[in-house]
Amino acid sequence: MAEYRISRRVTDAARRAMAARDQLRLGKVLAEEIDGHQTSTADLTRLAAELGCSLRGLRYAAATYRLVVRLGLTEADVRALGWTKLSLIASRTSQVRSKEDVVDLCTGRTAPELRALLAGGSGSEQQVTFTLSEKHRRELEAALICQGAKRVGRALVGKEAALMALVKQGTPV
């Protein structure tokens, strides 16, 4: 059996959607391709390289489109709620059962607030960004792991609590 390759039609449709910044159309093209064929990770990786994006981004676009279809959201709903917020929710579909759940989660929240809420926070947390050298980043990660953070894949889970433990150690009360 010959190895499946993503067709030029699909590649061109995905390229047009990206050029138009039409995430909904991109998600549709990808979801139909992934769900309709036995598309390998290698095929998707090649497509991502052709489009100049990440494999993860392609998978998120398809998952977000599937959420939109499952909940019966219209294009107007997607514009009103925001693609970024929907993509955050799509990765946690067990928390979403209906269109009303999505509206409740998105209304009055920024994407970072929604991300914090979905991660178990109150939704009112502030995001802080550090710019560190590679050496300092490794040192910070090691210190956070010593304080209880755990490496899961590419991420550190529990880094906020570990950072606050470090702060409390160094702050006189």
Image (spheres, rainbow, N blue to C red):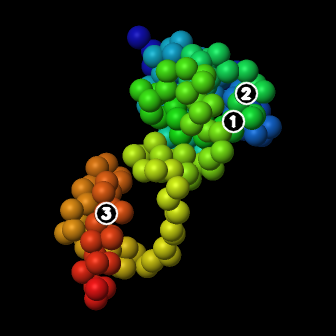
Is any atom of residue 126 visible in this view?
yes
Q: Residues within 10 Å of mark 3 (few under 14, many from 20)?
A: some
Q: Is residue 130 left or right of residue 7?
A: left
Q: Amino acid at mark 1?
A: Leu
Is any atom of residue 66 visible in this view?
no
Residue indicated by mark 1: 81
Going from N to C along the chain, the mark reached first, 3 or 2, is 2
Relative to 144, is 112 above or below?
above
Residue farthest along the front direction in this orientation: 173
Tell me how far mark 3 sits from mark 1, CA to CA: 31 Å
Q: Is residue 166 left or right of residue 16?
A: left
Residue indicated by mark 2: 77
Q: Quadrant of the N terminus?
A: top left
Residue 43 at x, y percent in the picture: 50, 30
* Residue for point 65% across, 39% down: 107
Q: Amino acid at mark 2?
A: Asp
Q: Nearer the viewer, residue 152 or 97?
A: 97
Residue 69 at x, y percent in the picture: 62, 17
Residue indicated by mark 3: 161
Q: Is residue 78 left or right of residue 141?
A: right
Mark 1–mark 2 CB contact (< 8 Å): yes
* Residue for point 43% across, 79% down: 133
Going from N to C along the chain, the mark reached first, 3 or 1, is 1
Q: Quadrant of the C terminus?
A: bottom left
Q: Nearer the viewer, residue 18 or 165?
A: 165
| SS at circle 1 | helix
Q: Nearer the viewer, residue 172 or 106?
A: 172
* Residue for point 33% across, 70% down: 163
Q: Residues within 10 Å of mark 1 (few under 14, many from 20)?
A: some
Q: Amino acid at mark 3?
A: Ala
